Amino acid sequence: MKRFLFFVFCFCSSLLIAQQTQNPYWFSLEQGKRAFRDGEYGSALLAFEQARHNRRTMYEQMERSLIDVLSIGEVRRMNDDLSRVEQYISDHYHVNAALALSELYYRIPKESLEGSALKALEALGKQKDYPEAEFWIGETYRAEGELSIALSQYQKAYQQRSLLENPGFDIEILYNIVDVLRLQRNYTAMEDQANEILKRDTLWSGDGGEQTRATMSGILENNGIDRFLTIYRYNNFSVERAHRLLGSYYYAYGRYPNAAQHFMFSFLIQNTLIAEAIRQRRYDYRFTTLDALITEAEQIPVIRTYMENVEYYRTLYYCAAAWSANSKSATAREVWTLLTNRPLAGEWASRARRQLRGSFIEPVEREL
């Protein structure tokens, strides 16, 4: 009963602390996001920096509270036994230390500490960083044209990714790093970071990935795009843009086999997602041909928006260009012919017509 009342007291104390804190770190972050959306970049930057400061200050105070307890002679003689330290904290009403441990257990599994009070202290110290704030500071500098500072902030946020509230957000940070490197024309570093994203593509980078790609390429070349899309489905949307970017990069620098494989993956993912979106609206949908798929997709506004966002017609065009440069002219001409009959393809339909009159290598570096 005594221990229960103590933890009730700790809970009430935490509420009181929260009420006394005008700007908790998460609140400052949200204020910054609102200012950023309104184009008030100076105010946004101040709010993000305040969020970073407030989080660090909070965890430093918690760290000191736990150090104070661990420095007591009686506690030092407990041989780093976390359960005994917890009991001591409860018995002696060390509220701030109890709050520190409660916060830590909310952030990480208690089992990962292996019963060690010193590991708890070390883990608490690691919570001071705030990758979301670092990311948004980077976003603000990028909006103001300070690309080098933005890149540094994104890199810092990625280094701290283990602390992200949303673990999947790290891939967005990587994409921002890639985008800045592309704008800086640092293509070698851009390639490295894009490949870091593709480590999340199990079909591409997993065991047997090279053989899988060879088999897929063979189906595409020998059986055509409709048969290829009938056999294969792949909906890993998070890596599609990395494949598309690397396809353009390798094509621009004459590495056509690499370009062809990356564009093949981008092409497959885009069309898989389009087919799935159609199927959600029409349960009896079955893929027949790419031409029919595009015809149906173009009638659905939300899918048409997706096609614009992923540069669908440009992707089709450069898929064909890469395949043509990689001696897959029949497949390339199949795609270019399809594009010429698509009014919504605009510029890419015009380019396809020129390719059909006599194929050539496109200078795409300016479009990376």
Image: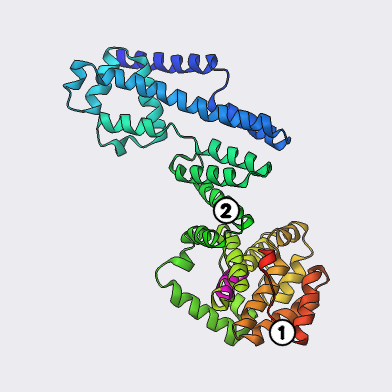
Residue at left offset 51%, top offset 25%: 54
Residue 195, percent from left and from top: 50, 62
Drawn side of residue 133 relative to residue 210, left or right: right
Could you say whether the residue bearing mark 2 is in a helix, strand or loop? helix
Which badge, 2 or 1, comes first in the chain's sequence? Answer: 2
Magenta segment range? 259-267
Residue 213 or residue 52, whichever sits in front: 52
Residue 268, percent from left and from top: 60, 70
Could you say whether the residue bearing mark 1 is in a helix, strand or loop? loop
Q: Can residue 1 be seen?
A: no
Q: Which residue is mark 1?
A: 359
Q: Residues within 10 Å of mark 2 (few under 14, many from 20)?
A: many
Residue at left offset 62%, top offset 28%: 46
Residue kind at label 1, given as amino acid type:
Ser
Residue kind at label 2, given as amino acid type:
Tyr
Residue 253, percent from left and from top: 59, 72
Instruction: Please determine whether, in this image, residue 338 is positioned above or below residue 303.
Output: below
Residue 329 or residue 343, whichever sits in front: 329
Q: Which residue is mark 2?
A: 175
Instruction: Please determine whether, in this image, residue 70 is positioned above or below residue 335.
Output: above
Residue 244 or residue 303, whichever sits in front: 244
Instruction: Please determine whether, in this image, residue 164 is positioned above or below residue 95.
Output: below
Q: CA distance from mark 2 to mark 1?
A: 33 Å
- Tell me the quarter of the picture where residue 241 sits: bottom right
Question: Principal SS element in the magenta part?
Answer: helix
Count of picture labels? 2
- Say whether marks 2 and 1 touch (CB < 8 Å): no
Residue 146 or residue 158, whichever sits in front: 146
Drawn side of residue 76 relative to residue 294, left or right: left
In the image, is residue 331 part of the stretch drawn in magenta?
no
Q: Can residue 48 be seen?
A: yes
Q: Residues within 10 Å of mark 1 (few under 14, many from 20)?
A: some
